[in-house]
Image: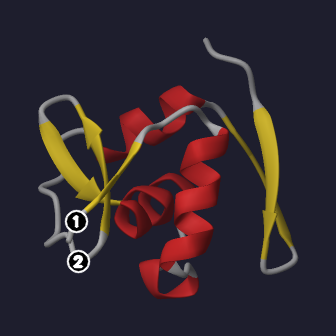
């Protein structure tokens, strides 16, 4: 299992691994990407969707910028859609 890392969002502390994000999207179809995405497997997911699924919080609680920073911290490459 990967190294657990912490982050705080909206005064709540989360402790997850990179694998937690990958596992969270397994068998979940990606939503429509608006600006930022991350490729997991062969699918492109909106960054907010991935973070929401991994944390169990609604995606509306995360800005695109926050989701971007969180996923970068866990070593994901972020794609920008023009």
When asked about the image quadrant of residue 50, the answer is bottom left
Give the residue number, with chain letter if any, for mark 2.
34
Residue at far top of view: 1
Q: Are the two marked residues, 2 and 1, in contact with CB atoms closer than 8 angstroms?
A: yes
Q: Earlier in the sequence, mark 2 or mark 1?
A: 2
Q: Residue at x 16, y 59 (%)?
A: 30
Residue 48 vertical position relative to residue 54 in the rendered view, above or below: below
Which percent across, then down, holds residue 66? 62, 70
Q: Residue at x 20, y 29 (%)?
A: 41
Residue 62 vertical position relative to residue 16 in the rendered view, above or below: below
Give the residue number, with chain letter if any, for mark 1.
81
Residue 48 vertical position relative to residue 10 in the rendered view, above or below: above
Relative depth, front residue between 37 and 10: 37
Measure the C-alpha gap from mark 2 to mark 1. Answer: 7 Å
Residue 68 vertical position relative to residue 48 in the rendered view, above or below: above
Q: Residue at x 56, y 85 (%)?
A: 61
Q: Please state if 19 lies on the left or on the right of 35 as rendered.
A: right
Q: Secondary structure at mark 2?
A: loop
Which percent across, then down, holds residue 15? 77, 44
Q: Looking at the image, is mark 2 or mark 1 nearer the viewer? A: 1
Which percent across, then down, holds residue 74? 61, 36
Which percent across, then down, holds residue 75? 56, 32
């Amino acid at each position: 299992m990967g190294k657990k890392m912490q982050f705080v969002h909206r005064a709540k502390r989360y402790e997850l691994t990179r694998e937690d994000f990958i596992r969270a999207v397994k068998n979940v179809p990606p939503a429509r990407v608006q600006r930022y995405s991350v490729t997991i497997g062969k699918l492109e997911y909106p960054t907010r969707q991935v973070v929401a699924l991994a944390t169990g919080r609604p995606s509306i609680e995360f800005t695109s910028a926050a989701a971007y920073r969180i996923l970068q911290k866990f070593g994901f490459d972020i794609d920008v859609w023009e």
